[in-house]
Image: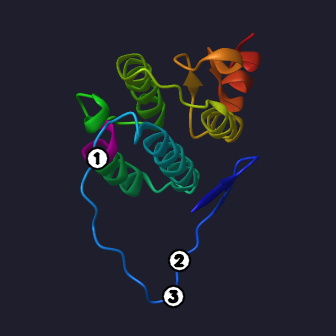
Amino acid sequence: MVVMDGPVKIDIFPVGATRPLQPPWTLSAETLASIDGHFWDWTLWLGGKSLRGERRVVAEELAKMHWFLLAPIGVEHAPRSLDRAIASYLDARSRATEELGVAVRPELGRQVTAALLRHGPVASCRACPGPLAGMSSRNDRRASARAR
């Protein structure tokens, strides 16, 4: 998997290949950056599923995400939406960076969140740091403008 600027996601998977189920992540100073990359990759992929109306897939994958990635970094409950997944992840990541004394580069998260806000699978990002803080989706902004 490669996520490039934009964000543009490229999955490279050989035809006919299978991957064994991996155990949940273990949080450490050495794994936090990889956990972050995996979270944003998965979230971007789920955004595409959400745009296609695949609600059941999104719900199932959010439960898997909790077991595999969110619970190991301290998120207590499985999120029921992408908005909630992002907010709970950012909160847990903030605590983890403080506790572990490591920094995580925010650019991938900014790009993924901006794309999800721009296209609508995420309604708002009140928990987002920096310029995305408090942003709402294009759909929410249109509805607000019509209501005025």
Q: Is residue 68 magenta?
A: yes
Crowd class of label 1 (few under 14; some 14 to 19; many from 20; radius 10 Å) = some
Q: Which residue is mark 2?
A: 13
Q: Nearer the viewer, mark 1 or mark 2?
A: 2
Q: Left of 4 or right of it: where is 72?
A: left
Q: Which residue is mark 1?
A: 63
Residue at 44 percent of width and 89 percent of height: 16
* Vertical order, 132 against 138 (above or below): above
Q: Quadrant of the C terminus?
A: top right
Amino acid identity at mark 3: Val
- Tell me the chief SS of the magenta region: helix
Q: Secondary structure at mark 1?
A: helix
Crowd class of label 3 (few under 14; some 14 to 19; many from 20; radius 10 Å) = few
Query: Given the current orientation, which residue lies at the most extreme bottom position?
Result: 16
Q: Which residue is mark 3?
A: 15
CB under 8 Å between callouts 2 and 3? yes
Q: Secondary structure at mark 2?
A: loop
Q: CA distance from mark 1 to mark 2?
A: 24 Å
Where in the figure is residue 114, as x and y percent of width and height? 68, 33
Which sits earlier in the primary sequence, circle 1 or circle 2? Answer: 2
Amino acid identity at mark 1: Ala
Q: CA distance from mark 3 to mark 1?
A: 27 Å
Q: Is residue 11 magenta?
A: no
Amino acid identity at mark 2: Phe
Question: Quadrant of the rendered structure where residue 75 is?
Answer: top left
Residue at 29 percent of width and 51 percent of height: 64
The magenta region covers 66-70
Which sits earlier in the primary sequence, circle 3 or circle 1? Answer: 3
> Which of 3/58 is in front?
3
